[in-house]
Image (cartoon, helix red, strand yellow):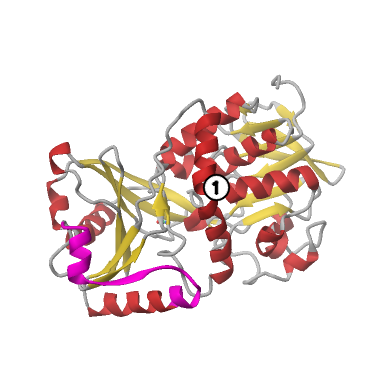
Amino acid sequence: MHPRTKPDVLVIGGGIIGLVTAWRAAQRGLRAAVVDPEPGGGAAQVAAGMLAAVTELHYGEETLLGLNLASARRYPDFVAELQEAAGGADVGYRACGTLAVALDADDRAHLRELHALQSRSGLESEWLSGRECRRLEPMLAPGVRGGLRVDGDHQVDPRRLAAALVAACERAGVVLHRAWAERLTVVRDRAAGAVLGDGTEVAAGQVVLAAGSLSGRLGGVPDEVLPPVRPVKGQVLRLTVPSAYAPFLSRTVRAVVRGSHVYLVPRENGELVVGATSEELGWDTTVTAGGVYELLRDAHELVPGITELPLTETRAGLRPGSPDNAPLLGPTALPGLHLATGHYRNGVLLTPVTGDVMAEVLVTGALPDEARPFAAARFSSASGPADPASASASASGPADPASGSGSAPVSVGVS
Ligand code: GLY
C-alpha cells in the first residue's frame, strides 16, 4: 500500500499485539497501517515468552483460561505460518514443557492447591516428588520438595516474534509510520485516524488502539471509552549458558519463593531468561539493585549453579494491566474505534488469538464468540455499538483509578 493511500485500519501501537492485528487484517484484504516510533519494540523486548496457560492459572480467571488455551493451541500453526510469511525467520518456539517446583512446605501447599485447581479445570499436570523433579532437571537444588510437570506449557522468543511480525507486516503491504501517535482524530462522532508527532494526519476507516500500558493515555480519546489499563512493572534478567554447561535446564522451571514468582526460561541458543518482578510503580522502568537481588536470590535457591553464569542483561518493562487481568478486544462506544489491549501477563500467549479476533471484527463488525467475555466495552461508562450481551460479562467494576488519565504520545506494545 502506498503510504499516502487511506488505510482501512490504522493500528496505534506497534508491539506484538498491534503488529499481529495489522498483519492478520492485511491477510484478510484490508489496507492496514501501524503507527509506532519503533515497531516491534515495547514490552516484547523484555518479556520471557512463556506460553503458560496451565502453570499461570489463577483463581477467578477460569474464563480467561479458555482464551489462553485457545491461543496456546494455535501456536504451532501460527508460528509456522508467521515464519514463512516473514521469509523464513525463526521465532524460537520451543515445545519444551514447564516444571513448577516447591522449595518449602508453604510452596508445596501452594502448588498442591494449584494442582487441584488445574485438575478441576480439566488441565493436564502431573505431581512429582522432589527426587523425580531433580531427575528431570539435575541442576535443581537438593531441597526441592516436589513439583508439577506441565508438558503443555511451552515458550517462544518474544524478540524474534516481534521481528518476524514486523517482517510479515512489511511483506503483506502494511505501512509502518515510524512516529508517535499524538492524538486520535474524531470526525462527526467517529474515530477517523490519528495525528502523528510531526503534525501529519493519517485518516483511516477504523482505528485500533493497541498501545499496551500506554493505551489509556492517548490524547483525543473521549474519557468514557479510554481503556482502564495501567502499567505493571516487571524486571527481567538475561544470562548466558556457556556451551560447556549445556543443557543447563531442558524446560522452563518456575517457583513461588516467599510469595514472589520466579521463572527461568532456557532458550535453545543458550540464553536463560530469569523473571520477573511485579511492581505497581506507575511508569517507572528503572532496574533496581533490589529487583535484581531478589530475582537472583530466588533463582539461586531454585538452581544454585546460576551464579556461575554470565549476567548479560537487566531490563524492566510494563505489562498492560486491566481491572480483571483480561484483555479488552473489539469495538468501543466510539464508532470506528477498537481496542486490543490490557493483555497483562499474557500478551505473548494471546498473540495468535488476538490477531484472529481483531481481523474478524475489523472485517465483519462482529466479535467472535470466544472473545465476547473480553469485549472492550465491558468497562465503558458509555453504551455503544459493542454487543451489550458481552458487556454483562464484566468481571469487575469501573475503570481502575490508577490508570493514567493524562494524555501522552503513544507507542509502546504489550508483553
Ligand atoms: N507472564 C509472565 C509475567 O508476566 O511475568
Quadrant housing residue 144: bottom left
Q: Is mark 1 within 8 Å of ligand 1?
A: no
Residue 213 horizontal side relative to residue 385, left or right: left
Residue 322 horizontal side relative to residue 98, left or right: right
Residue 22 horizontal side relative to residue 69, left or right: right
Callout 1: SS: helix
396 is higher (above) or lower (below) than 165: below
Task: Please tell me which residue is depicted at 53% across the width and 50% down the height of the picture.
Answer: 213
Task: Please tell me which residue is depicted at 53% across the width and 60% down the height of the picture.
Answer: 69
408 is higher (above) or lower (below) than 232: above
Determine if residue 220 is in view.
Answer: no
Q: Position of residue 339 (x, y in %)?
A: 67, 50
282 is higher (above) or lower (below) than 61: above
Residue lying farthest to the right in this orientation: 188
- Residue 214 falls inside the magenta stretch: no
Label 1: how many Cα within 10 Å (few below 14, some 14–19, many 20+):
many
Q: Which residue is mark 1?
A: 351
Residue range in magenta is 117-138
Q: Which amino acid, mark 1?
A: Thr
Q: Position of residue 50 (x, y in %)?
A: 40, 52
Q: Position of residue 96 (x, y in %)?
A: 34, 51
Residue 74 horizontal side relative to residue 257, left or right: right
Task: Please tell me which residue is depicted at 70% across the width and 64% down the height of the picture.
Answer: 378
Determine if residue 340 is in view.
Answer: yes
- Ligand 1 found in image quarter: bottom left
- Residue 129 falls inside the magenta stretch: yes
Instruction: Check the picture and name the quadrant holding the N terminus.
Output: top right
